[in-house]
């Protein structure tokens, strides 16, 4: 199982290597007008498909932000708002926006060692091979196209994990085969327990308020 997962990760990394775009964070700052209404407001909550805090993306890895936006644009991720926004962006726009958010929140490095998970949650993390992709502290993913998770909003993480289990819904769902295979092992209650633990860890993610009058 572990070897198969690592092989799949390698193929995914190689597939994305050719699509890389030059990044310009300063240019990205001029292209985020559609982003700041949600991601620039601390504690802002989305209401679809359920109520949860909009994810913190300042300090997130640039390659992951690029990967996520491309997935929305292609329909591999489904969300009415994000689909429309991502679909309106060029590859260069996506690269620049990703670079801006990646460098936006500069914080001290997170510790390499984090508080151990409760026994029941630790068992779930092992079953899902979570550390093998997202790092032992959930802030240093194996591949830069995978997200930093530590400290992210628990309700958002729960909603995101459940989305990988959703099939046949034109408005909701995520099509990543690796993640779908992992999360389908768990009940929604177990996914919530995993999310609550990861959210409790120190992380590099922040919401940096943005001036709407740009």
Image: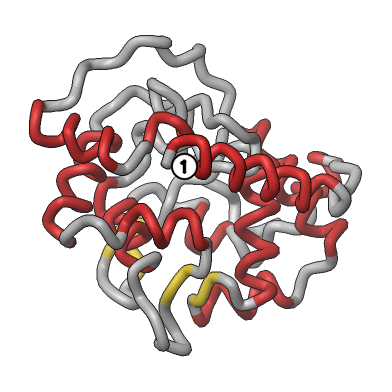
Name the secondary structure under disc 1.
Answer: loop
Is residue 127 found left or right of 133 in the rendered image? Answer: left
Q: Nearer the viewer, residue 147 or 53?
A: 147
Q: Residue at x 51, y 76 (%)?
A: 78
Taking 26 as reference, is 138 above or below it? above
Q: Quadrant of the C terminus?
A: bottom right
Query: What is the basis of the colouring in this image?
Result: secondary structure
Is residue 117 found left or right of 78 in the rendered image? Answer: left
Percent coordinates x, y for residue 108 in the rendering: 50, 13
Q: Quadrant of the N terminus?
A: top left
Percent coordinates x, y for residue 69 in the rendering: 65, 61
Percent coordinates x, y for residue 98 in the rendering: 70, 47
Taking 89 as reference, is 202 above or below it? above
Q: How many marks?
A: 1
Q: Residues within 10 Å of mark 1 (few under 14, many from 20)?
A: many
Q: Nearer the viewer, residue 198 or 126?
A: 126
Q: Where on the picture, by quarter, is residue 44?
A: bottom left
Q: Nearer the viewer, residue 213 or 42?
A: 42
Q: Where on the picture, by quarter, is residue 129?
A: top left
Percent coordinates x, y for residue 109 in the rendering: 50, 13
Residue where numbered disc 1 is placed: 207
């Amino acid at each position: 199982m572990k070897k198969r997962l690592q092989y799949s990760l390698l193929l995914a990394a190689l597939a994305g290597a050719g699509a890389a775009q030059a990044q310009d964070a300063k240019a990205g700052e001029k292209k985020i007008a559609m982003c700041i209404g949600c991601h620039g407001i601390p504690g802002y909550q989305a209401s679809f498909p359920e109520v949860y805090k909009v994810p913190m993306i300042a300090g997130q890895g640039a390659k992951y932000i690029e990967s996520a936006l491309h997935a929305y644009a292609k329909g591999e991720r489904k969300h009415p708002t994000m689909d429309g926004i991502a679909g309106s962006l060029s590859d260069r726009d996506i690269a620049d926006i990703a670079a801006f958010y990646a460098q936006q929140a500069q914080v001290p490095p997170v510790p390499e060692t984090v508080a151990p998970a409760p026994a029941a949650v630790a068992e779930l993390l092992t079953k899902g091979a979570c550390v093998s992709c997202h790092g032992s502290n959930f802030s240093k993913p194996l591949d830069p196209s995978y997200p930093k998770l530590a400290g992210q909003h628990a309700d958002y993480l729960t909603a995101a994990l459940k989305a990988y289990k959703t099939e046949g819904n034109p408005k909701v769902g995520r099509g990543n085969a690796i993640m779908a295979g992992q999360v389908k092992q768990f009940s929604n209650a177990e996914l919530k327990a995993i999310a609550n633990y990861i959210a409790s860890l120190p992380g590099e993610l922040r919401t940096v308020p943005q001036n709407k009058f740009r």
